[in-house]
Image: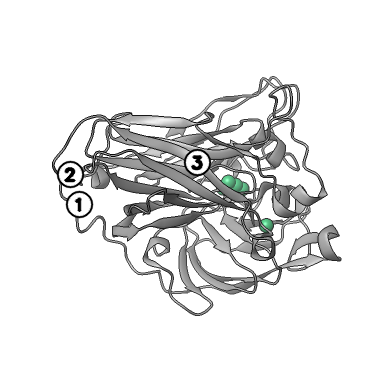
């Protein structure tokens, strides 16, 4: 059993959610588990994840965006024997680095007030400064020939298109819930708020590599990108002639489980006109006192997400690691074919997901499914469900 003690030393209620972990709903740290000022919340659960990069962040009802913006987020690194047996970099701080990417907007006093205007509430709040683990203008001296970067998109509203300034290739080895079956070679990777990925980067060329992010808000399908920001410069300081060989295979990933339960459709929509609407799921905004649906324990379901808006919505589901079956009828790219808990949904797109609900049922506690653009979530683009 893992026992965590979360002490709320703020003078307002706050909640802390274990994003990506499979656990009992009462331990999930969602909006139904607020911690009173001065109180300590001590959830206990068995850690059932495969090795991977998970995170935790604030989830107070209606205040998630403000609390995360102010800094309430961190990373959980899960290790296991399967991963430990693979020839991968895993020495923390030497060849294995965790990077939380966020952007922030600073005022004249260098404070980061949470002050989204109408436009920010629609597009997601996006800062003008890129932060890596809270630092601006980060660089990383490296001695190893190949490093592993565990990247968390911890932004409120930004989708990042990660790439190196010189177009250098890198490999993705893990998605939200753990390792992929094999390394996937990429020259760019899109990461939406809430998503994690692990990458291998070869530094044997000896030259610095500058990681950049093109930043997209929810409205980017019609507004375009916000710009390109420098993320971090990797600076090799030891010469190597070659990097160790990349493993050709990582883990065995079974195909998505066969469906035994329902197919549910979630229609994402915007009601109202222009930039003044409400974001809804199946016609409704989140109601803290309404359980939207229940799922029978043991069921394997198919969830269809239909994006009927003009915007991007990274959809996140608590409790499970799901599999993407298709995007508009086409199978997912290899980098998205593994374990996922966030999936970026594009305008007009139809996504099919396969999810299995195992181990935990509790009619009295709910899990959330919501858009991970935190301004959308706080505006009610969220549903809650119980596993019974
Ligand atoms: Cu990462 Cu409901 O949250
Ligand atoms: Cu979550
Ligand atoms: Cu959204």
Report the disc number at residue 299.
none
Q: Is residue 380 left or right of residue 59?
A: right
Give x and y (percent) for residue 382: 70, 55
Give x and y (percent) for residue 253: 31, 62
The colour scheme used to paint the residues is one colour
Give me the residue at 21% from left, 30% from top: 238
Residue tagged 2? 243
**Residue farthest to the bottom?**
329
Residue count near mark 3 (Cα–Cα under 10 Å), binned few <14, some 14–19, many ≥20: many
Distance between the Cα atoms at labels 1 and 2?
8 Å
Q: Nearer the viewer, residue 239 or 177?
A: 239
The secondary element bearing badge 3 is classed as strand
Residue count near mark 2 (Cα–Cα under 10 Å), binned few <14, some 14–19, many ≥20: some
Distance between the Cα atoms at labels 3 and 1?
27 Å
Residue count near mark 1 (Cα–Cα under 10 Å), binned few <14, some 14–19, many ≥20: some
Give x and y (percent) for residue 168: 33, 52
Q: Nearer the viewer, residue 337 or 235?
A: 235
* Residue 20 appears anywhere in the view: no
Q: Quadrant of residue 109?
A: top right
Residue tagged 1? 246
User: Mark 2 or mark 3: which is in front?
Assistant: 3
Give me the residue at 69% from left, 65% from top: 222
Say above or below: 104 vs 217.
Answer: above
User: Mark 1 or mark 2: which is in front?
Assistant: 2
Please say if the residues under marks 1 and 2 sit with CB atoms less than 8 Å apart.
yes
Residue tagged 3? 230
Q: Is residue 20 left or right of residue 246?
A: right
Distance between the Cα atoms at labels 2 and 3?
26 Å
């Amino acid at each position: 059993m893992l026992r965590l003690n979360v002490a709320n030393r703020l003078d307002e209620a706050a909640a802390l959610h274990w994003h990506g972990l499979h656990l009992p709903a009462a331990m999930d740290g969602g909006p139904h588990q607020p911690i009173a000022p001065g109180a300590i919340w001590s959830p206990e659960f068995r850690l059932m994840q495969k090795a991977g990069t998970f995170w935790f962040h604030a989830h107070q009802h209606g205040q998630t965006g403000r609390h995360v913006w102010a800094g309430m987020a961190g990373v959980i690194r899960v290790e296991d024997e399967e991963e430990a047996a693979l020839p991968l970099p895993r020495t923390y701080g030497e060849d294995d680095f965790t990077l939380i990417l966020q952007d922030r907007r600073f005022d004249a006093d260098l404070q980061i007030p949470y002050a989204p205007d109408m436009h920010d509430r629609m597009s997601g709040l996006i800062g003008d400064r890129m932060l890596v683990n809270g630092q601006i203008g980060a660089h990383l001296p490296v001695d190893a020939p190949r490093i592993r970067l565990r990247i968390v998109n911890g932004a409120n509203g930004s989708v990042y298109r990660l790439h190196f300034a010189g177009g250098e290739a890198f490999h993705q080895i893990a998605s939200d819930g753990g390792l992929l079956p094999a390394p996937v070679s990429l020259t760019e990777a899109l990461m939406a708020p809430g998503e994690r990925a692990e990458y291998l980067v070869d530094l044997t060329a000896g030259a610095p590599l500058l990681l950049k992010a093109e930043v997209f808000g929810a409205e980017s399908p019609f507004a375009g990108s916000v710009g390109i920001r420098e993320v971090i410069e990797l600076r090799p300081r030891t010469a190597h002639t070659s990097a160790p060989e990349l493993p050709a295979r990582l883990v065995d990933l079974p195909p998505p489980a066969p469906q035994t339960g329902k197919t549910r459709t979630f229609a994402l929509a915007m009601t109202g006109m222009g930039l003044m609407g409400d974001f809804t799921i199946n016609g409704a905004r989140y109601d803290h006192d309404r359980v939207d649906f229940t799922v029978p324990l043991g069921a394997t379901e198919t969830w269809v997400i239909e994006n009927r808006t003009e915007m991007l919505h990274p959809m996140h589901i608590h409790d499970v690691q799901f599999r993407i079956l298709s995007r508009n009828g086409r199978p997912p790219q290899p980098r998205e074919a593994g374990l996922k808990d966030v999936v970026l949904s594009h305008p007009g797109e139809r996504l099919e997901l396969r999810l299995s609900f195992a181990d935990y049922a509790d009619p009295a506690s709910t899990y959330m499914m919501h858009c991970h653009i935190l301004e959308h979530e706080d505006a009610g683009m969220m549903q809650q469900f119980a596993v019974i």
